[in-house]
């Protein structure tokens, strides 16, 4: 019975860890997305990627680069 309870807590801790890692990754990507979207040279396999309308209206030079 005790082993079953410990296994349950271990599974819960692993699920919590995966959720925290996912949230952290999402926040980092969301924070860095405006800088990447406004980069002047969007080349993917030799083709130009269309910029979003929000980037053309935003001042791309004002975003601070992430360290």
Image (tube, rainbow, N blue to C red):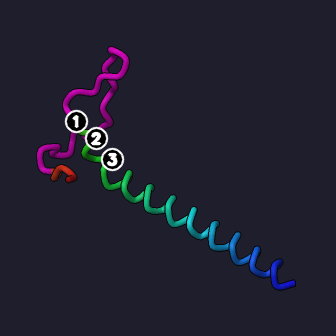
Q: Residue at coordinates 29% horizontally, 43% vertically from top-left?
A: 54
Q: Label 2, secondary structure: give it.
A: helix
Secondary element type, mark 3: helix
Q: Residue at x 63, y 67 (%)?
A: 14
Distance from disc 1 to disc 2, alpha carbons, whole Å, reads 5 Å
Residue nearest the observer in this picture, 62 or 24: 24
x%, y% of residue 33?
33, 47
The quadrant holding residue 61 is top left
Q: Position of residue 26 (x, y in %)?
A: 44, 56
Give the residue at x 83% y 78%: 4
- Give, as a single range, the part of the protein colored magenta: 39-62
Report the residue at 34% width, 25% height from top: 49
Q: Secondary structure at mark 1?
A: loop
Label 2, residues with CA under 10 Å away: few <14, some 14-19, many ≥20: some
Residue position for label 2: 36
Q: Are marks 2 and 3 in contact (CB under 8 Å)?
A: yes
Q: Quadrant of residue 16?
A: bottom right
Q: Is residue 45 magenta?
A: yes
Depth check, front residue: 2 or 14:
2
Q: Residue 2: give its label.
A: none
Decide whether residue 50 is among the magenta residues. Answer: yes
Q: Nearer the viewer, residue 56 or 62?
A: 62
Above or below: residue 10 compared with residue 46: below
Q: Alpha carbon of mark 2 to alpha carbon of mark 3: how far?
A: 5 Å
- Answer whether labels 1 and 2 touch (C-beta < 8 Å): yes
Residue for badge 1:
39
* C-alpha gap between disc 1 and disc 3: 10 Å
Q: Position of residue 15 (x, y in %)?
A: 64, 66
- Residue named by callout 3: 33
Earlier along the polypeptide chain: callout 1 or callout 3?
3
């Amino acid at each position: 019975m005790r082993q079953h309870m410990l296994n349950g807590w271990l599974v819960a801790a692993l699920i919590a860890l995966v959720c925290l890692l996912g949230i952290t990754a999402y926040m980092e990507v969301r924070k860095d997305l405006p800088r990447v979207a406004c980069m002047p040279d969007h080349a993917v396999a030799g083709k130009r990627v269309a910029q979003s309308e929000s980037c053309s209206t935003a001042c791309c030079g004002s975003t601070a680069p992430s360290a």
